[in-house]
Amino acid sequence: MYYLLEAEGFDCQLANAREVKNVPGRPKTDKADAVWLAKVAERGMFRPSLVHPEPIRRLRDFTRYRRSLVRDRSREKQRVEKLLEDAQIKLSSVISDLFGVSGRDMLDALAAGQRDPKILADLARTSMRGKTALLVEALTGFFTPHHGELLAMMLANIDRLTEQITVLEARIEELVAPFCHQVEQLAEIPGVGRIGAAEIIGEVGVDMTRFPTAAHLVSWAKFAPAVHESAGTKKQKKRPKGNPWLAATLGNAAGAQTRARTFLGARYRRIARRRGKGKAMVAVGNSILTIVWHLLSDPDSRFHDLGADYYETRINAERRARNLAAALQAVTGQKIIIQGGKAIIVEPEAA
């Protein structure tokens, strides 16, 4: 209905039903609802929901469908691995990427009817040639003709999905062309890339005037710490459910930084040690959204990585040494002092 009215030139506002509910205890009719909504809109008692312009909405449809197909392809690959395990083929224990060049050649040969482990292992390429003995052992199993039929169907599905994903990516490049400058800005963020940048633009848009500050964008995406206080007591509360498509993109970008030598990687490891991996992922997603807001707010800004040693360079070495000495003293019972940058154990004086 919103799109129909918008196409006719009306200035529409989309309201969240949760924010415009009628007062309990009053009659619930269509006419009464219309009167109530008119009063709410007249007095400015609700916040209009974010509705992107049509180019962004088209881009969003393609990026979301691409992610759905990627998930379907991942499920199909998992089915292939499960089928091989059922046939006692332990190929994934030797090959890290089962659907790489070598692995795919072996799977195609299995589906075509080849059962000799030595011939299958001889299909390995480059560095995999050094694992021929392990491949022969891994390919020795109980692979029957019905396994081959199922494998051929699964590989055909994977190829079909891969082809559709390629077509979608080409279409996404066409739709994101008007925002090429923003894509280049966002693609510089570690772990995002061009596809991730297109997904972020499809979900967030490029007009950051809708979010007064970066904190507003983070709060809208539900990547901000939730506050739940009652009677002066703060209680634990999980992250609210926000946009699942944006959360998936940020999760992929954050997951790529777990071991990277970047500022985001250092932030993840620093928080994961104290708070756990889940909270660290949310914190890194929060940082990525903050970077996104600043980049999209200023067309001339570019991403600059603060470096993996950002936190280390801001630690007071002497205070850190004293804290470690105090912790060691509490464990061992010995008196330890820091002198000249070295830890010295002070022997107790003789009675």
Image (cartoon, grey):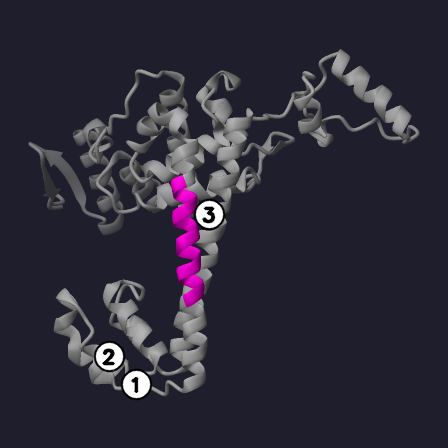
Q: CA distance from mark 3 to mark 2?
A: 33 Å
Q: Residue 193's x, y, as percent?
A: 32, 38
17 relative to 278, above or below: above
One can see residue 190 in this view:
yes
Q: Residue 268's x, y, as percent?
A: 33, 41
> Do residues under tags 1 and 2 come within 8 Å of each other at their CB atoms?
yes
Mark positioned earlier in the residue sequence (1 or 2): 1
Secondary structure state at the residue bearing disc 1: loop
> Hey, which residue is sitting farthest right in the picture?
27
* Depth order, front residue of 110/189: 110
- Residue matched to label 2: 120
Amino acid at circle 2: Leu
Mark positioned earlier in the residue sequence (1 or 3): 3
Q: Quadrant of residue 297?
A: top left
- Residue matched to label 3: 67
Residue sitting at x 28%, y 74%: 106
Q: Residue 246's x, y, as percent?
A: 48, 38
Mark positioned earlier in the residue sequence (3 or 2): 3
* Depth order, front residue of 338/20: 20
* Depth order, front residue of 12/344: 12
Write the start and end of the magenta stretch as one range.
Answer: 156-170
Residue sitting at x 70%, y 17%: 10
One can see residue 225 in this view:
no
208 relative to 237, above or below: above
- Residue matched to label 1: 115
47 relative to 315, above or below: above
